[in-house]
Image: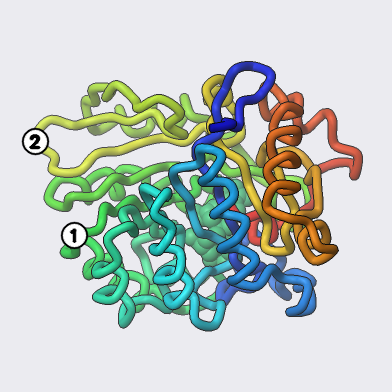
Amino acid sequence: MNKLIDSFGRQMEYVRLAVTDRCNLRCQYCMPAHGIDIVPRQELLSFKEMYRLIRVLTELGVKKVRLTGGEPFVRKDFVGFLEMLSYNDLLDAINITTNGALISHHIDKIESLKKVKNINLSIDSLQRDKFAKITRRDVFPEVYKTFELLEKSSLNLKLNVVVQSGFNTDEIVDFVRLTKDKNVAVRFIEEMPFNGKGQRDMQENWTFKKILNEIKTEFSVDEIKAEKSSTSKNYKIEGHLGSVGIIPAFTRTICGDCNRIRITSTGTFKNCLFDDGVFNLRDFIRNGASNDDLKELFLSLVKDKPENGFIAESNRKKGNISESMSTIGG
Ligand code: SAM
Ligand code: SF4
């Protein structure tokens, strides 16, 4: 079988697919208060087109898919798509990133789909008022309910916490405390400039190191040997059921063994989160490309994968980062 191997010998096994650019929340670090300019519906990939792209990628060695957005559960019949994707026998795991505000009544169904293994739930504050300030929507009780249901379910649960200077850094220790009795991996993410404006307005730069030092003010942590291509550095605390992790999303120290590629909701292929999109797959397939054409294309596209996120950023043709994470699919 032909494999997706880049010019640095890294094999692509994981695809992140944004199923929509729409979202029910307006997180400050992701988009402006009025939202982003969403594209007309016909410009979004259909579920059939997504299924086909993933199928072709799995025939080239991709084993896992992460479905993200925008908010995946905003898209009509997203649960039906999960079911459809489960029929791909070459796929080992379907993972989902969600804000959790719309999913509590879907959890039983999701649990019944054996390929759906990991859910990342985004939750940036444990305080209702602060949560509403960050997301610009008052949905904390619903998100927390989802958290509790997921924690009791058989799904593997991770919490995504974007560390935002001046907003939630005082809660880092509270989030770590959650791991004492709950079987959950709390992952702190460095804030990136994907907020639809371009620049990060922050008083202090909360880097990986600074986050770790904050955790160490209360807890003594032991590093867990990371799985290859993991996006986070992970830690165990003695006597805690769960674990903590830090994702150096902005300082980008994890690029060396990256095995990920991305497809946006409009079908743009991305080799790196920080590139500005390298090919429009939607137009390619709508113009009649065959699966063999697609395979040939993917094999050649990954050859241009940049060595790391800094090089990808410096190669951008469209200028500085100004996209929202909800169009890229974080
Ligand atoms: N709506 C879903 C959610 O929020 O989980 C999925 C899409 S969201 C774009 C995916 C992840 O990206 C979330 O965990 C979110 O917190 C994170 N994210 C969004 N904007 C970010 C930024 N500027 N810096 C770091 N992480 C960001
Ligand atoms: Fe929506 Fe997720 Fe962006 Fe928040 S981070 S606005 S929930 S896409």
Q: On residue 254, which mark appears?
A: none
Q: Quadrant of ligand 2?
A: bottom right
Give the residue displayed 31% in from the left and 54% down from the top: 117
**Badge nearest the viewer, 1 or 2:** 1
In the rendered structure, which amino acid carries the disc numbered 1?
Answer: Ser
Q: On residue 154, which mark appears?
A: 1
Q: Under tag 2, what secondary structure?
A: loop
Label 1 crowd bin: few (<14), some (14–19), many (20+), radius 10 Å: few
Q: Is residue 187 left or right of residue 297?
A: left
**Toward the viewer: 141 or 117?**
117
Q: Is residue 273 left or right of residue 130?
A: right
**Toward the viewer: 172 or 197?**
197
* Circles 1 and 2: CB atoms closer than 8 Å: no
Q: Is residue 88 above or below residue 277?
A: below
Label 2 crowd bin: few (<14), some (14–19), many (20+), radius 10 Å: few
* Residue 175 spot, x, y in % from top left: 30, 49
Q: Under tag 1, what secondary structure?
A: loop
Give the residue displayed 79% in from the left and 78% down from the top: 40
Task: State which quadrant residue 43 falls in.
Answer: bottom right
